[in-house]
Each structure stands twice: as structure tokens, then as C-alpha cells.
Amino acid sequence: MRPDPGHAPDAALTGDAAQESDAGQEESAPQDPGGVRPRRRGRRPAGEDTRAALLAAARAEFIEQGYDGATVRAIARRAGVDPAMVNHWFGGKEGLFTASVIRLPIRPSEIIRRLLDGPPDAVGERMVRTFLTVWDASGGGQFTALVRSVTGTEMAATALREVFVRKVFRRVVDELGMAQGDLRATLCGSQIVGLGMARYVLKLEPLASTDIETVVTAIAPNLQRYITGDIGVADGG
């Protein structure tokens, strides 16, 4: 499955800019009370390289094993560093999970801007196209890790609810002035998360390998109804 060449994600959507900022902040943080940076352990001499290696190894391990199955020792071995580096840079497994997976390849404000940039009756198309373009670019990796970890940690479930439903879908519905905002937002979540599950986790064919525009054509009308159409509930807020 290849990314749609017509809709390449930028740094804001892939999370590159946010991760660079975070990396810079964490790089300068660890110091002893005298203001001297502690000597780093592990086979990589540069802290930046160690942090990046741990993030990459953690994503891969969480994708394959989920939160429960991934261990600090396995992640460190995969990164080629001392397991103590996980505590040094991230404070433990939970902090590493948050930095590598819950920092979704989505910047909510940028997603919302893109979804609202155009006719209201085409927001469903933009929603499907945007999410699939971002996820296809990474083979669905971080989404897969997040979904596989939902049963193992409340953080993953909270991330799905907060980022997808509250910070993106509910705000889009509110900006469009639609009633029944909570219901519409959760219906959107069920459609987009379900699509991600089928395409990247279950790999249901032919959906898993179908090109983005075909999926947009097939799914967007139903999603559009969730956003602006009749959902069978009387308006009441």
C-alpha cells in the first residue's frame, strides 16, 4: 500500500515539527543539582541519537506487541542502548509510550483548518482523504500501535477519545453550527477509527490496498451525513 502521491503530508500533519520541539526541550532538561549534565550511558554517544533511536524502537515494538507486550528491555535492545536510557530520557515505559505513540501523526489545529477549508458539503471527503494520506505515509504504524494498546493502557483509549472525538470531530461539527455535536462527533470517530482498524490493523482486502480516492468516494457520503445530515435525532443542542 503506497501513499497517495497527490496528497503528501507536511511536517504539521506528520508531527515532525512538534517532535523536533519536544526533542529540544527534553535534550536540555536532565541535569544534576550543580547544573552539570550527567554522563550518558549506552552505545550511542549523542543524547539526540539515543532519544531518536529509542523513539523509533518503541514505535516498532508497540506496533508489534502493543503496550502490554512491549518491554523496556526489548525496546532498549532494539535501539542498541542501555535500558537505563529509557528512564533517563522518558521516565519509564509510560513516558516513552506517550512520546512515541500518543504523539499522533496529527496536529489537531492543522487537521481542523484543512477540514474546514472548503465547502461544508465536502468536509466528509476532506476528512477521509486527510486521515488516510497521513496514515498511509507511515503504513498506519502509529495508529496501529495506538489501537493495539487500547486494552493495555487507558492512555491509549484516552488519546483516541481526546484527539479524534473531542479535539477534531467535535470542533469541526461546532464550527459548522450543527446540533447534536457529541453524537455527530462520536459517529465520525466510529467511522474513521473503524476505517483505520480495517485498513491497517486487520488489513482487510481489498480495502487495505485500495487507493485513497476510491475509499474517499465510497465512504465520504456516509461520513458527510454524520457531520451535516439527518442522523434521526431531533435538534436539541
Image (tube, helix red, strand yellow):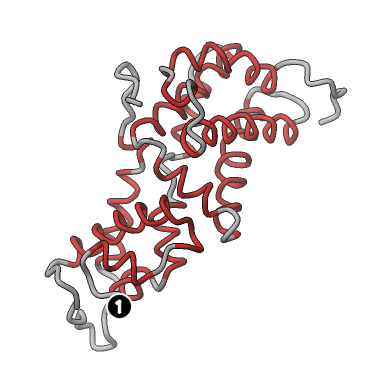
The image quadrant of residue 57 is: bottom left
Residue at image position (78%, 21%) is 231
- Image-based side of 220 in relation to 110, left or right: right
Residue at image position (37%, 56%) is 61
Q: Amino acid at mark 1?
A: Ala
Q: Is residue 192 above or below residue 223?
A: below
In the image, 204 versus 55, the foreground residue is 204
The N terminus: image quadrant: top left
Q: Is residue 212 above or below residue 158?
A: above
Residue 173 location, x and y as percent? 65, 28
Residue at image position (53%, 22%) is 116
In the image, 161 versus 180, the foreground residue is 161
Residue at image position (41%, 52%) is 64
Q: Which residue is disc 1 drawn over?
A: 84
Residue 92 location, x and y as percent? 41, 72
The C terminus: image quadrant: top right
Q: How many marks?
A: 1
Instruction: Check disc 1: other Cα within 10 Å, few if <14, some if 14-19, many if 20+.
Output: some
Furthest residue in direction left, as rendered: 45
Q: Is residue 141 above or below residue 185?
A: below
- Image-based side of 180 in relation to 139, left or right: right
Furthest residue in direction front, as rendered: 205
**Circle 1 SS class:** helix
Q: Is residue 119 above or below residue 159?
A: above
Residue 196 location, x and y as percent? 52, 34
Residue 115 location, x and y as percent? 51, 24
